Amino acid sequence: MRPTVHDIAERAGVSLATVDRVLNDRPGVRGVTRAKVEGAIAELGYVRDVAAANLAKSRVYPLVFILPEGDNPFMRGLEDEVRRAGAHSMVERTQLSVVTVPAFDGRALAREIDGAIERAVAGIAAVAVDAPEVLAAIGRAREAGIPFVTLVSDLANSGRDHFIGVDNIAAGRTAGSLMGRFLGERPGPVAVLAGSMRVRDHGERLEGFLAAMSAMPVSRAVLPVLEGQDDPELSFGLIAKCLADVPDLAGIYSLGAGNRGLVKALAATGAARSLCVIAHEVTDETRAALEGGLVDAVLNQDAGHEVRSAIRVLRAKADGLPVIAAQERIRLEIFIKDNLPSEPGADDTPGAAGN
């Protein structure tokens, strides 16, 4: 049977009010008395139920999610998941808010982080941009005692508390392995469409992709990265030009969120039938492209799981509790036409191939 505050009070020979003051580090307790209570806690092996204590105190956790704005279906899906979680958040005494900033804009992201610090939120989750301003802002959040997690794209050297997302190097390796196996001995170069190499997840995916491609039995060129800024029209123009300029193109790896433009270019040129195309994230566009044969495989991460994981991690960090690593591991899912789920992202453990 777990020891209680009543057991502590009896062992230390003090009142329940005194035990409560010690547990909550409040003044009004003499040093000798405090030592007795702490000794009783240690002897009994008492572990405080922080969640219950916060419930009793009616503590509310204001958490802010800072996401890129613009035409990025996956980010809009993340935003929808935050708002969906927010509809039920007061049951768990959590207040969720979403702020959007221009994509790939480090200064704008840093300003919003500073704004969240000024509002004294209980935790911040943000899609990171690899910029000095962002690193400095995360440092200021840590100095203020505000837990910080990175979403989707990490900044491991920033001092953030936790990263929530897939292993992006492994994702790139997976894409490279699939590309090499699908193409077999067919010759021809491969194009890569990214959003911006200023975000760490795109750089890590490219790193993994190049490593896997270089290990394939058939050596093939990987063309210079096309940076479409996750903009549909810019991505369309880049891919259309690439298809026109490289008649022997064998494959395309879309490692960002420019898939709307990619699919439009493939459909307009009729080139998809002779290409291997691998993209990221199951959205309306990539789902239709898989079903229609324009895309061969899609690597996916569950936006709903990521949002719920961020909330759990931020609350645990705010309470000084450990994070359950296995629960917060975001799996990489591999979808082809034949295993597309009817409702992607409906739960944390969809029936796709995981990595």
Image (spheres, rainbow, N blue to C red):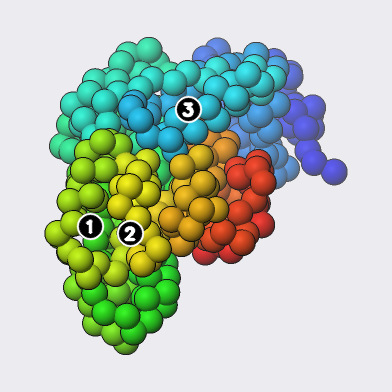
Is label 3 or label 1 in front?
Answer: 1
**In the rendered image of this protein, does residue 261 appear above or below residue 34?**
below
Q: For the residue carrying disc 3, how many other residues have a C-alpha within 10 Å: few (<14), some (14-19), or many (20+)?
A: many
Could you tell me residue 141's position as x and y percent? 32, 28
Q: For the residue carrying disc 2, how many other residues have a C-alpha within 10 Å: few (<14), some (14-19), or many (20+)?
A: some
Could you tell me residue 333's position as x and y percent? 53, 57
Q: Secondary structure at mark 2?
A: loop
Q: Which residue is mark 3?
A: 79
Residue at screen point 46% across, 62% down: 296
Q: Which residue is mark 1?
A: 243
Residue at screen point 53% across, 35% down: 307
User: Which is nearer the N-term, disc 2 or disc 3?
Assistant: 3
Q: Which residue is mark 2?
A: 271
Q: Nearer the viewer, residue 44 or 202?
A: 202
Could you tell me residue 153's position as x and y percent? 34, 45
Give left or right: position of 180 versus 326: left
Q: Which residue sits furthest right?
A: 1
Q: Secondary structure at mark 3?
A: helix
